[in-house]
């Protein structure tokens, strides 16, 4: 196990030809190697083929349930689920169920989305995605607490019983690096995950979040290693984020066929550094 910071992986889920069993094998391998978490991306109806831009061929909540049955300790998360495209009542039911099935290993990572055509395809106003996300997070927490009626701008229920109530609070991670995203993190999140940042920019964003709230928020980021950069450079980058205050760094280790080997190489090099 890693003593200071969690090292995690973003599993490859952008190739429709890849058997889903390979995702399971990679999650099992990640757990065996000592990674603390695995993440799956989400895209519902991208305008072009899944690949470098769009991940999430396999629906993440369903797939994480499958991974939960094959693993025992590693955390399972979405990075990130496009929340305003989802019915929050159904998502709350799915998340609470997965939390029970996995032994409380779920982190629900959410974002507002960026591809307008996906919103048009499901009839959701793209310009309302931020407001919908804020309300959906509030509703999710309301349901997770087993509370009663809820009345919001987009969602309401005046009666009904929500179960199963999670045995422990399900951490909600918010991804994003814009000023609005960071304000949303400060207001609603248990965790934050950045993307495309240098350690220096990451530290600046963390300072912005910390200055906006007294709530404890775990902070982390995602990076990619496709084999182009030297391994020592990747480890130095991870250590840079650790020095900048990261609680977690999630690495996407390139193409599926070389993913397991890169995970093993990264773990070995990180432990020696």
Image (cartoon, grey):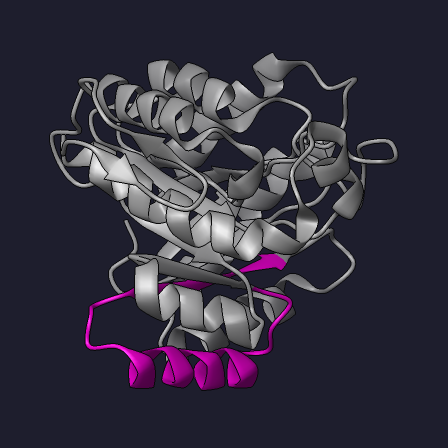
Q: Residue at x 43, y 25 (%)?
A: 28
Residue in front for this viewpoint, 219 or 130: 130
* Residue at horizontal 23 percent and vertical 33 percent from the top: 143
Residue 192 locus on image (x, y percent): 41, 61
Image: 26 above or below 62: below
* Horizontal and vertical percent position of residue 149: 20, 32
Evaluate whether residue 35 shows in this view: no
Where is residue 112 drawn, in percent x and y? 56, 51
Number of labels in the image equals 0
Q: Nearer the viewer, residue 80 or 245?
A: 80
Q: Position of residue 229 (x, y in %)?
A: 73, 64
For the residue pair 26 and 141, the one nearer the viewer reads as: 141
Residue at the image point whose x is 46% and y is 71% from the top:
182
Residue stretch rendered in magenta on the structure = 195-223
Q: Is residue 224 magenta?
A: no
Confirm whether residue 62 shows in the render.
Answer: yes
Q: Is residue 147 left or right of residue 139?
A: left
Q: Nearer the viewer, residue 273 or 91?
A: 91
């Amino acid at each position: 196990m890693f003593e200071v910071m969690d090292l995690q992986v973003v599993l490859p889920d952008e190739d429709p030809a890849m058997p889903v069993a390979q995702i399971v094998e990679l999650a099992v391998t990640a757990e065996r190697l000592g990674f603390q978490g695995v993440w799956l991306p989400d895209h519902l109806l991208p305008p072009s083929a899944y690949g470098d831009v769009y991940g999430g061929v396999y629906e993440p909540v369903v797939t994480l349930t499958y991974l939960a049955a094959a693993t025992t300790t590693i955390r399972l998360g979405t990075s990130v689920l496009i929340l305003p495209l989802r019915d929050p009542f159904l998502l709350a039911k799915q998340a609470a169920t997965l939390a029970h099935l996995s032994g409380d290993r779920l982190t629900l990572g959410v974002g507002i989305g960026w591809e307008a055509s996906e919103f048009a395809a499901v009839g959701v106003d793209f310009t309302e995605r931020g407001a919908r996300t804020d309300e959906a997070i509030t509703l999710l927490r309301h349901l997770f607490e087993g509370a009663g009626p809820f009345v919001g701008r987009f969602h309401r229920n005046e009666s009904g019983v929500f179960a199963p109530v999670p045995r422990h609070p399900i951490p909600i991670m918010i991804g994003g690096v814009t000023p609005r995203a960071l304000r949303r993190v400060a207001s609603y999140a248990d965790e934050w995950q950045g993307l495309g940042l240098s350690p220096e920019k990451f530290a600046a964003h963390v300072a912005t979040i910390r200055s906006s709230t007294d709530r404890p928020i775990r902070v982390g980021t995602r990076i990619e290693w496709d084999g182009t950069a030297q391994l020592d450079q990747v480890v130095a980058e991870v250590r840079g984020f650790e020095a900048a205050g990261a609680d977690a760094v999630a690495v996407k280790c390139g193409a599926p066929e070389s993913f397991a080997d890169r995970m093993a190489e990264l773990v070995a090099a990180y432990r020696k550094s």
